[in-house]
Amino acid sequence: MIKTLKRYKSSILLLAVAVFIYIISPEKGIKIFTITKSNIKEMISVIPPIFVLLGLLDVWVDRSTMIRFTGKGSGIKGMLISFLLGSAAAGPLYASFPVAALMIKKGSSLFNVLIFVGAWSTTKIPLLTFEAASMGIKFMSVRLILSIMGIFIIAYVTDKLLTNDQKNEIIALNSNINE
């Protein structure tokens, strides 16, 4: 019981704050609970398909294949695959983290995982079509080029700034997932 309370202390604290706000200002409290309900519905609609995808990826793609295509020695091919996987994905950014963790567990290089998360967050294909239609192809092209440059620069700098011990710690943390 105490272990459960410690694990969810942030959620319990936020719930207590929301109840306190509801007592002080019912209209703000109702708004808090309405937004929370909406967010929970969104998460429930996004998370199950992501976990189905993770299960299939975990079973169907063996470690040696993942290492060959996105591992340390994969070069430009690995960067391109990671970028395209992130760009083709759908869903909010938080849905990319379990996929990224599985990529690390399966042997992808941290650099390619960073590219994947960066592409997921900024270069989704549906976003590009929306931008082209509403803001013009010139705007979309400039933003896309700058985003791609930013993704690779951030991934490179992050990869270089992390020590081997830090990288090994990240890999070790992810290797314990689903075991």
Image (cartoon, grey):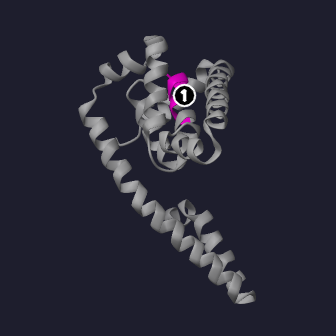
Q: Is residue 115 magenta?
A: yes
Residue closest to the far left:
60
Total numbered labels placed on residues in the image:
1
User: In this orientation, which residue lies closer to the viewer: 64 or 125?
Assistant: 125
Magenta range is: 109-117
Residue bearing the label numbered 1: 115
Q: Residue at x 60, y 22 (%)?
A: 165
**Residue type pointed to by label 1:** Ile
* Residue 3 versus residue 66 in the image, above or below: below
Quadrant for residue 139, please give it: top right
* Residue 59 versus residue 15 in the image, above or below: above
Q: Residue at x 59, y 72 (%)?
A: 35
SS assignment for the magenta stretch, majority: helix
Mark 1 secondary-structure assignment: helix
**As drawn, is 5 to the left or to the right of 70?**
right
User: In this orientation, which residue lies closer to the viewer: 149 or 16?
Assistant: 149
Q: Is residue 98 magenta?
A: no
Q: Position of residue 175 (x, y in %)?
A: 42, 33
Q: Position of residue 54 (x, y in %)?
A: 34, 42
Q: Position of residue 138 (x, y in %)?
A: 65, 33
User: In this orientation, which residue lies closer to the viewer: 17 or 140?
Assistant: 140
